Amino acid sequence: MRIATTIRISLFQNDGHSPLSDKQDLMSEWHLYIIRTRNGALYTGVTTDVARRLDEHSHSKKGAKFLRSKGPLQLVYQQLVGSRSEAQRLEYQIKQLSKQQKEKFIATHSA
């Protein structure tokens, strides 16, 4: 799978200190995260604060509509990426994977 190979290379060759491109990136480090819903669906996102974002998804209207009434939610993967643009690139690549590929990714990259 070409996409999976790209993700593997991007995640493990990136030491979390990508070149910073704008003021927002200078002030924060970005994370890629994957959440599992009650029925096993996977949701991928990016944020500067994973705990805050998980709480928003679980308890507020600031969370993604996809996740509403699908709790409890479980954080199954997170990765410090560095810049916002790199985090968004990785998010896009993960979202292109099938559920089976995402499950394999989570199983092989989570500690």
Image (cartoon, rainbow, N blue to C red):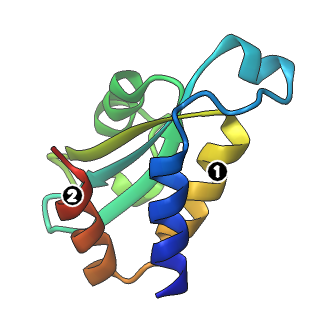
- Residues 85 and 12: in front is 12
User: For the point 77% across and 27% down, which residue is it?
Assistant: 20
Which structural element holds mark 2? loop
**Amino acid type shown at disc 1:** Gln
Q: Is residue 82 visible?
A: yes
**On the image, which quarter does residue 36 sit in?**
bottom left
**Amino acid type shown at disc 2:** Thr
Q: Is residue 96 visible?
A: no
Q: Which mark is residue 64?
A: none
Q: Nearer the viewer, mark 2 or mark 1?
A: 1
User: For the point 51% across and 61% down, which residue is it?
Assistant: 9
Residue 2 image offset from top left, x and y in percent: 54, 84
Cα distance, mark 2 to mark 1? 21 Å
- Callout 1: few (<14), some (14-19), or many (20+) C-alpha neighbours within 10 Å? some
Q: What residue did someone put label 1 on?
A: 88
Q: Determine whether 26 is above or below 45 in the image.
A: above
**Of the image marks 2 and 1, the number of the one nearer the N terminus:** 2
Q: Determine whether 67 is above or below 49 in the image.
A: below
Residue 107 image offset from top left, x and y in percent: 17, 62
Q: Determine whether 8 is above or below 4 in the image.
A: above
User: For the point 39% across and 29% down, which residue is it?
Assistant: 50
Q: What residue did someone put label 2 on?
A: 37
Residue pushed farthest right?
22
